[in-house]
Image (cartoon, rainbow, N blue to C red):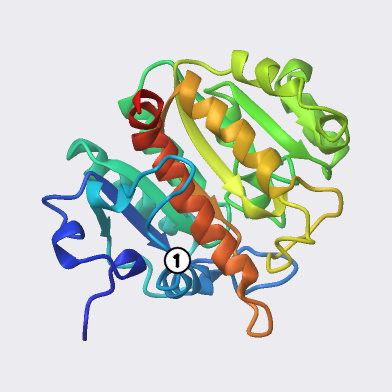
Amino acid sequence: MKKKTFANIPKKYATMKKSQIVLIPVPYDYTSTWKKGSKKGPNSFLYASKYMELYDIETNSEVYKRGIFIVPPIINSSFISSKKMIKKVYNITKKYLLLKKFVTLIGGEHSISIGSIRAFGEKYKNMSILHLDAHADLRSIYNGNIYNHACSMHEASKKYPIIHIGIRSMDILEMKYIKKENIFYGHEIFINDLWMDKAITRLSKNVFLSIDIDVFDPSITPSTGTPEPGGMLWYQTLKFLKMVFEKKKVIGFDIVELLPNKKESSTDFLVVKLYYKLLSYKYELMTYKKT
């Protein structure tokens, strides 16, 4: 079987040894509570990447030349417990962090972040989490499971500052886990962009970025498990994320909750573009500034 590369990049840019970037697919959706199918997200993401241009106009760069290595899927069955899945994600994330790679993950449901955050938190001091999502994901337990996707930020909230962006759906019990100055609700950020600097000042030096694609408005990302009206749009999101990469050290990121739809592929492609844009911001912004 021919090994896949991200966006069909030449194999010389896709080996583990030479790549600066590692992509970990986590095809898992066991705890999804409305629409299941995000376990198919990583494959749809990789398929859509084949049709993306590798030149980024904004940064005048081809970041794939830094090398992007795809880790073989670490989950063979979507029926393993979320606890076991999280341990697998933790172990594989830690492995590549120790190899000094820039580690990225593509889900799957948001519970995968519990494992990756554990690994990043062990390596990096003074870490904060930038959480872009329609939902707060701060429940202590949901459907009898503390590792449910609706609990993806709960454990981390006890250890690290979390800055929540775009939230527009939550349970009232989650309010006790939120610091008012660290949450920027969807209806607030819609008004103007003044919130962007405020949010960034709340972040520490080292930032782990977690993006649930339902943070976007369903008009541009309909293929996700729990779409919510009133979300962020493409250029607003990129403007903010670019500022984050300019002012902070982004140490890694995950993108979750792509739920492929055979009748709609634009969401798959948007997630691929977002992934590549984040890498371009990580590695090419300084180069771009000097030109």
Screen quadrant of the N terminus: bottom left
Q: Residue at x 37, y 74 (%)?
A: 76
Total numbered labels: 1
Quadrant of the rendered structure where residue 203 is? top right
**Percent of width and height locating residue 51:** 44, 72
The residue nearer to you, when weighing 65 against 212, is: 65
Screen quadrant of the C terminus: top left
Q: Residue at x 30, y 53 (%)?
A: 64
210 over 86 or under it: above or below: above
The residue nearer to you, when weighing 240 against 88, is: 240
**Percent of width and height locating residue 189:** 81, 31
The residue nearer to you, when weighing 155 against 284, is: 284
Please state if 152 lies on the left or on the right of 277 as rendered.
right
Q: Is residue 106 visible?
A: yes
Q: Amino acid at mark 1?
A: Met
Q: Is residue 86 visible?
A: no
Please state if 63 lies on the left or on the right of 137 as rendered.
left
Please state if 271 lies on the left or on the right of 163 as rendered.
left
**Percent of width and height locating residue 88:** 35, 55
**Percent of width and height locating residue 288:** 38, 32
Residue marked by disc 1: 52
65 over 123 or under it: above or below: below
87 over 140 or under it: above or below: below
Q: Residue at x 64, y 26 (%)?
A: 163
Q: Residue at x 82, y 55 (%)?
A: 228
Q: Residues within 10 Å of mark 1 (few under 14, many from 20)?
A: some
Under tag 1, what secondary structure? Answer: loop
